[in-house]
C-alpha cells in the first residue's frame, strides 16, 4: 500500500562533484534521505514501469537507505528494481548494469573515497540511462526540488532480503537481487586478453591489490585470483595485515567493511602508504594497485615507480591498442582540466581529439556517448573508457596488466620510454583539508580579482602568460559550466590550478594542482616536489595560501 508522507524541505541538499555527500548523522535526520530520493524521482519524467538499478559501496547506512529507496521506487511507479547482492555494486559495475539491462537510471549509494562509519560519510548519487552520473541540468533540478518538497511516497512492505539472489514482489514492482560481480567480470573479459595476463602471472609475475576493505574486494578476488590465476593472497595483501595487525591469511581487506576498517578508502600516497612502501622495497612484487571506496579510482605503483594518475592516463592511451577491446585505436582522449597535459601529447602523436572538461565524471558522458572520446581520465586517480560511463578502478588495473603482458617490460621501463618519447609532465596536487570555509572562499575571490592583472607579471624566472577561471563549453549539448577552477599558465607551459573540492563534508578543501613540462630525458629522474619547488612557492605567493588558511603545509600531497 502506498503512503504519502508529508515532510519539510532541507536547504542543504545540493549535489557536489559527485552526488550528495554528508555525514551519516545528517542523512539520519528525519526524512533526509527520503526527501532527496523523492526529489530525484520528482525531477525525472517517464520512468513508469521502467527499471531502476540500486547498489552501493557497502558503507555504514547502505542497507537502510537501499530498503527506503526500493519502497519509494515501488510507490513512485518503477516496474523493476535490480539491486546488487548485499546491497553491493561498485560504481563502474552499477554503470554497466544500467547499460546492460537498459535501465531508466540508477541510484548509487556511496561517498567514494571518504571514510565511512556511524559518524563518517554517506552519499547518494543518481545516474542516468547512459550509465553515467546525472548531468548538471538534472542535479540542478534535484536541488531545486529538494528546497520545496513537501511530501514523499513510499509503500508499506517488509524489507527485501538482500543477501540471496532472486526476485521478490514489492507492491506492483519486482525486485531482483543480482550477483554484483558476474556481469562486470564478463565485461572485463571481453575487453582484455585474460590468457596473456594469466600466462604472465603463471610465469611468476607478482601482483598485489589493496581493496582497502572497500567495494572492489569481491570484484578483484573474482577476477584477479579466480579468472587470472594469481595466487591466493594477491588480493588480500599482507598490507592490511601489517597495518591492522590482522593475522596472516586474514580476509578482511577484500571483504567490504562498513567503516573500511577505520581507514580512508582513498588510494593515494598517504592512505595507501603501506602499498607504496611494499612496492619500493627491494623484494617488491612486480605490480601494485589499489582502488577506492566505490571502486572507480585506481592507484598504480609498479616495482620502484609510482605512476601519477595523469601519467597513467597518457600511458594507457598510448598503449591501449595492445588490449583487444581497443585494438582499433582510440577516437579521442578526454581529461579534466586540472589533469596534466601528458595525455595531450599522446593525442597529438596519435592524431586524435583531446578534450578538456571540468572536474567530475559527469562531464565526460556526452563525449563518450557521441563517440568523440574513447578514454577519459582525471588526476584524482580516475581513468575509464567508453565501456561504461564512470571511471573504473579495476579496468585501469587490468589494462595495465594487459599492456605489461603484451610489452613484456616492467612498469618502470614503460614509463621511462614514455617520457623519453613525449617528455615528462612533473605533476603534484597539494590538498589543504578542512580549511575554514570563509577563508577558502575569500582566497578564491581574491585570486579571481587578481586574474586580469597577472599576465606579464614575473615571479623569479616564471612569467605569467595567461590567467583565467575555467569555463567549459560542452561541444555536444552546448551547455556552459562556469567557475570550474582558476588556472595560471606560465610562459614555457608550467601551470598552477586552484579549486575548492566539491566532495568534502566538513569545512572546505583547497586543491592546488602544480605542473611543469620537462622535455629533457636527462632530467626525467628528479624528485617531483623538488622539480616543482619554484612553482609551489609561487602558488603560495600568488594565492597567499599560508597566510589565508593558517596552514604551513598541505594535509595531503599526491
Ligand atoms: C574529487 C576529484 C574528482 C573526482 C571526484 C569524485 O572531486 O577531484 O576528480 O571526480 O572527487 O571522485 P573534488 O570536487 O573533491 O575535487 V570519487 O571516486 O570520490 O566519486
Ligand atoms: Co570513487
Image (cartoon, helix red, strand yellow):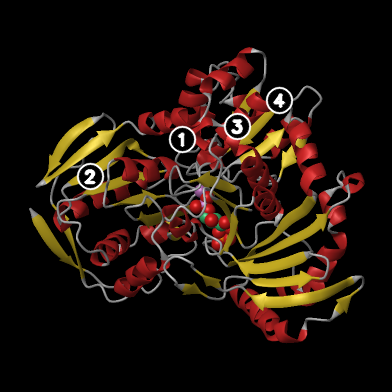
Q: How far separated are the C-alphas under marks 3 and 2?
A: 38 Å
Q: CA distance from mark 1 to mark 3?
A: 32 Å
Disc 3 vs disc 2: which is toward the camera? 3
56 in relation to 243, above or below:
below
Callout 1 crowding tier (Cα within 10 Å): few <14, some 14–19, many ≥20: many
Report whether residue 72 is seen: yes
Marks 3 and 4, Cα distance to the nearest angstrom?
A: 19 Å
Q: Determine the CA span between mark 1 and mark 2.
A: 23 Å
Q: Residue at x 46, y 49 (%)?
A: 390
| Front of the two marks 1 and 2 | 2
Exactly how many numbered labels are in the figure? 4
Q: Residues within 10 Å of mark 4 (few under 14, many from 20)?
A: some
The residue mark sitting in front, 4 or 1, is: 4
Q: Which residue is mark 2?
A: 81
Q: Which residue is mark 4?
A: 286
At 48% across and 74% down in the image, what residue appears?
Answer: 480
Dot 3: what SS?
Answer: helix
**Where residue 121 is drawn, which disc sits there?**
none
Which comes sooner in the sequence, label 2 or label 4?
Answer: 2
> Secondary structure under badge 1?
loop
**As drawn, is 515 to the left or to the right of 271?**
right
Give the residue pinned by disc 1: 256
| Side (left or right) of 181 relative to 234 | left
Amino acid at each position: 500500500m502506498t503512503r504519502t508522507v508529508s515532510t519539510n524541505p532541507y536547504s542543504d541538499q545540493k549535489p557536489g562533484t559527485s552526488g550528495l555527500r554528508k555525514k551519516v548523522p545528517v542523512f539520519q535526520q528525519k526524512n533526509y534521505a527520503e526527501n532527496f530520493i523523492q526529489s530525484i524521482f520528482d525531477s525525472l519524467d517517464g520512468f513508469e514501469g521502467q527499471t531502476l538499478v540500486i547498489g552501493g559501496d557497502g558503507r555504514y547506512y547502505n542497507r537502510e537507505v537501499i530498503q527506503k529507496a526500493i519502497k519509494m521506487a515501488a510507490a513512485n511507479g518503477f516496474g523493476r528494481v535490480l539491486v546488487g547482492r548485499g546491497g553491493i555494486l561498485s560504481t563502474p559495475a552499477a554503470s554497466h548494469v544500467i547499460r546492460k539491462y537498459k535501465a531508466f537510471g540508477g541510484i548509487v549509494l556511496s561517498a567514494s573515497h571518504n571514510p565511512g562509519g556511524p559518524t563518517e560519510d554517506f552519499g547518494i548519487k543518481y545516474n542516468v540511462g547512459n550509465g553515467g552520473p546525472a548531468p548538471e541540468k538534472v542535479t540542478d533540478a534535484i536541488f531545486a526540488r529538494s528546497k520545496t518538497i513537501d511530501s514523499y511516497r513510499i509503500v508499506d512492505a517488509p524489507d527485501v532480503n538482500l543477501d540471496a539472489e532472486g526476485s521478490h514482489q514489492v507492491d506492483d514492482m519486482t525486485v531482483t537481487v543480482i550477483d554484483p560481480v558476474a556481469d562486470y567480470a564478463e565485461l572485463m573479459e571481453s575487453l582484455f586478453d585474460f590468457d596473456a595476463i594469466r600466462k604472465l602471472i603463471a610465469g611468476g609475475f607478482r601482483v598485489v591489490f589493496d581493496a582497502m576493505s572497500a567495494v572492489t574486494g569481491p570484484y578483484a578476488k573474482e577476477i584477479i585470483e579466480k579468472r587470472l590465476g594469481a595466487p591466493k593472497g594477491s588480493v588480500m595483501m599482507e598490507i592490511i595485515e601489517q597495518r591492522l595487525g590482522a593475522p596472516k591469511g586474514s580476509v578482511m581487506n577484500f571483504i567490504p567493511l562498513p567503516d573500511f576498517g577505520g581507514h580512508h578508502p582513498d588510494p593515494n600516497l598517504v592512505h595507501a602508504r603501506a602499498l607504496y612502501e611494499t612496492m619500493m622495497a627491494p623484494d617488491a612484487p612486480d605490480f601494485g594497485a589499489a582502488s577506492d571506496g566505490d571502486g572507480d579510482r585506481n592507484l598504480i605503483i609498479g616495482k620502484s615507480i609510482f605512476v601519477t594518475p595523469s601519467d597513467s592516463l597518457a600511458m594507457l592511451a598510448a598503449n591501449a591498442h595492445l588490449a583487444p577491446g581497443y585494438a582499433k585505436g582510440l577516437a579521442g582522449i578526454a581529461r579534466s582540466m586540472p589533469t596534466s597535459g601528458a595525455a595531450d601529447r599522446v593525442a597529438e602523436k596519435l592524431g586524435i581529439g583531446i578534450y578538456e572538461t571540468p572536474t567530475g565524471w559527469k562531464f565526460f558522458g556526452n563525449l563518450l556517448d557521441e563517440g568523440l572520446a574513447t578514454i577519459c581520465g582525471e588526476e584524482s586517480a580516475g581513468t575509464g573508457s567508453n565501456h561504461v560511463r564512470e571511471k573504473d578502478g579495476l579496468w585501469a588495473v587490468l589494462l595495465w596488466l594487459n599492456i605489461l603482458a603484451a610489452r613484456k617490460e616492467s612498469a618502470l621501463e614503460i614509463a621511462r620510454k614514455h617520457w623519453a618519447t613525449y617528455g615528462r609532465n612533473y605533476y603534484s596536487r597539494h590538498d589543504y583539508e578542512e580549511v575554514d570555509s570563509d577563508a577558502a572562499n575569500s582566497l578564491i575571490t581574491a585570486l579571481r580579482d587578481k586574474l586580469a592583472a597577472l599576465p606579464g607579471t614575473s615571479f623569479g624566472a616564471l612569467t605569467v602568460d595567461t590567467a583565467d577561471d575555467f569555463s567549459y563549453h560542452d561541444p555536444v549539448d552546448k551547455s556552459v559550466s562556469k567557475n570550474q577552477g582558476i588556472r595560471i599558465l606560465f610562459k614555457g607551459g608550467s601551470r598552477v590550478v586552484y579549486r575548492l573540492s566539491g566532495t568534502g563534508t566538513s569545512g572546505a578543501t583547497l586543491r592546488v594542482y602544480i605542473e611543469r613540462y620537462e622535455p629533457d630525458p636527462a632530467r626525467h629522474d628528479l624528485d617531483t616536489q623538488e622539480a616543482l619547488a619554484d612553482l609551489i612557492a609561487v602558488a603560495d605567493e600568488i594565492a597567499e595560501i599560508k597566510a589565508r588558511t593558517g596552514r604551513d603545509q598541505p594535509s595531503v600531497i599526491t
